[in-house]
Each structure stands twice: as C-alpha cells, then as structure tokens.
Image: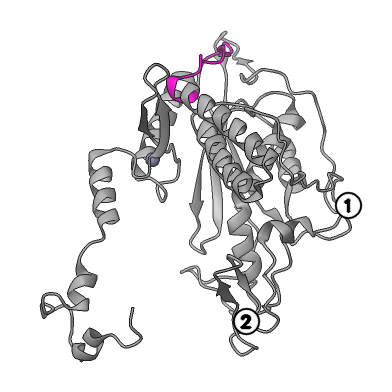
Amino acid sequence: MNAVDQDDAELGPVDPADEEPRPGSRLARMRQPLARHVVEAVAVEEGVCVRPVALRRVDLDTGETTIVPAPCGATLASKCPPCAERARRLRMAQCKAGWHLDDEPLPDPDPPSDEAKDLGRFRADLEALRKESEQAGDAANVADIDGVIGHVDEALAELGVRGKAAPDNRERPRRTRSTRRRQDAADLPRLPVDKRTVGRTYSAPDGTAWRPSMFLTLTCDTYGRVLTDGTPVDPDSYDYRRAARDAIHFPKLIDRFWQNLRRAVGWDVQYFAVLEPQRRLAPHLHAAFRGTVSRVVLRQVATATYHQVWWPATDAPIYAPDGPGLPTWDEQAGSYVDPVTGAELVSWDDALDAIGPDDEPAHVVRFGPQIRADGVTA
Ligand SMILES: [Zn+2]
C-alpha cells in the first residue's frame, strides 16, 4: 500500500453510519465482507466445520490425488462453532447414556477409519521423503517436511488416534524438565490407578443402592479485592500479571488436577466439566464427576496440584519503543534481526532449549483456596 492513501485524504469527517461511502473508495472496500468471513458464516449456518483439515488422498490404483476435507474437531466455540457444538452434544449424549451405568464400559479400540489410514499412508510417504532429503543433505527440505509431519500428527490426534505413528527421530532432543516435586507443594497419596470408573455404592436400609456423584468448583487464586462488577478495588496493587498468566495456563492445571485425583483415589475418575470466567474474568471450573471423594481428599489434591510454565523470562522488554528501535524483517535470513547488531533474533524453540536445569519456571499456576464440593444423587 502507498504511504499516503488517496482515499484516506478524501474521506474527511464522514460518519460511516449515516453516509454511504463513494463506490470504489477505500472505505467502501473496507466495508465489503472478507471472503473468508463469508465462507465461515455460511459454514456456521449450515453446521459444518469452518476450518476443515485438508487431507491428501492418493488412489493406489490410478495414482490420482484428491484433497479430502476432514472436520477440525475443535471443542472451543471460539475456534470452530459447529465442531464445538457437535462435541458438546456428543458429551451430553455420553453423559445421559453413561452416567449411571454400574458396569465398566471398556470397549476395544475402534478399527482405524479410512481417514486415519489415508493419513497414515501420507505420513509414511513423508518419512520416506524426509530420509531422502536428509541423505541429500537438504536441511531446508527436512525442516519443511518436519513441519508437515507435525501437522499430520496433529490431524491424527484429532481423529482420535492414540500414540505416535513413528518414534521421534528429530534432531531437536525432547526438553526434559525436572520432575522433582516442588518443596512448597504438599505430598499426595499415590495409588495404582484401577481400570475402574464406577464409584462407591451405598445401600439404604430398605435395600436401595445409591451411587452418588459430586459437583466440584475450582477457582483461581485471588489477586486483590474486587468490586461487585469484578473490577479491582485498588488497581495499583492488583496482580494483573499473575491473573493473566493463571488464566492462560488454567486448563493445564486442571489436567494435572484430574491426574493427581485419579492417583490419589486409585480409580479412573470420570467427569464432565465446563470452564467459565467469573465476574473478575478469572476462569473457574464446574465439574460433575462420577463417584464420591471426601472433601478432605479433594482439598488435599487441589492444594498439592500445580503447573510449572517453562517459558523464557518475559519481564523486561528488550525492544522497547523508546529504545534503539524494533527488530526488522530480513528477507535473506528469513528472520527478524536486531536493528543495531543485525543478528538474527533467538527463536522460541531455541529460547526454550536455553532454559537450564537450575532455572526457575517462569510461572507456577495454582488453584485458589475456594473449593466447593457437593454430593449429588440421581
Ligand atoms: Zn471444525
């Protein structure tokens, strides 16, 4: 775009709400819906995936290649409303059909779908190509293929295929972080987890069997007092930074919680849950889980659960607007470079690799002290 846009100069103080923009002007163009948004809106209206994963399918007899779109399978409405709605309905059906079962549903794994098999073949082709490129010393090509293999693995995972299709033979070694428990976290009981999802049964004097469930609410910590509308009483002392980081990593903390809970009680606790923002925008979790666990154990597990975020330090900006300038894009290097030294900026992966065994995590997420747990009977 030109530095000075002619149409901008012509616009003047026009209120776009009450005057139609001149046809062909920049404003008129800006008002036209983006093609992508139109397609997305139609997809949402028709209840189909808005960002299908494109899979290449090769007909083994004719060698013909076709592109097959598969639904993305997102469970977040912000990513794909139709897929999220489908997932929600599936969960509702599963809950209705399975909540009060008293036998263990442990079906055999499903036979792989055609989609999964196509992806598997595609992945095998990629591995072969990768090997060729590696032998030819074409590092750029190897990196490209690794990228595609990563996407295929993600697509396979979204199709519900468990495990890895091939061992990780990438140059980048897996980063290992200390698995030592934090000194400041309470120890948890560790029982072998039975392949059992049904909770305890209680018998009433009249012989009726009860299999109660529980409702559980877990929240983030407090970051300072808030007013009734959720805004801080004292904005200067409110810990916005911790609030934001906790909110970003809260889902990881929840995964840890279920893992810890299952180990602490020794059976495969099943749950349905929803993450919601509180008025102060901190996320909290409402969960219904099958079976009962004492409040003491729930509190113990919640208190002992934490998630460590291994990010490079982000507290001090390196390129501030009033500093020596912002990084610039270097076409040749294919990377952003330092405005003064011209050196390539450190990539996220390299920055993560540089975190040493003695470094502290950038952030530790924990639950707040408020825990609600109530028994529910059918
Ligand atoms: Zn989708």
The reply to whether residue 358 is visible in this rendering is yes
- Element on which disc 1 rests: loop
The reply to whether residue 363 is visible in this rendering is no
Query: Which residues are the magenta region?
Result: 101-116
Label number found at residue 183 = 1
- Indicate which label's residue lies in the foreground, 1 or 2: 1
Q: Residues within 10 Å of mark 2 (few under 14, many from 20)?
A: few
Label number found at residue 43 = none
Whether the residue carrying mark 2 lies under 8 Å from ligand 1 is answered with no
Q: Tell me: 175 left or right of 20.
A: right
* Residue 59 percent location from the top left of the image: 39, 21
Q: Is residue 377 above or below residue 170?
A: above
Instruction: Look at 77% across and 47% down and name the residue there.
Output: 175
Q: Is residue 377 above or below residue 177?
A: above
Instruction: Look at 55% across and 29% down and name the residue there.
Output: 125
Instruction: Tell me the distance, in whole angstroms, between the alpha carbons under discs 1 and 2.
Output: 31 Å
Residue with the mark numbered 2: 236
Q: Tell me: 6 left or right of 185.
A: left
* Residues at discs 1 and 2 in contact (Cβ within 8 Å): no
Q: Amino acid at mark 1?
A: Gln
Prevalent SS, magenta region: loop
Q: Nearer the viewer, residue 355 or 346?
A: 346
Q: Which image quarter is the N terminus in?
A: bottom left
Q: Amino acid at mark 2?
A: Asp
Q: Nearer the viewer, residue 256 or 83?
A: 83
- Element on which disc 2 rests: loop
Instruction: Look at 44% across and 45% down and name the residue there.
Output: 76
Q: Nearer the viewer, residue 194 or 342?
A: 342
Q: Nearer the viewer, residue 182 or 30?
A: 30
Residue that protrudes farthest toward the front in the picture: 136
Marked residue nearer the N-terminal end (1 or 2): 1
* Residue 339 percent location from the top left of the image: 63, 82
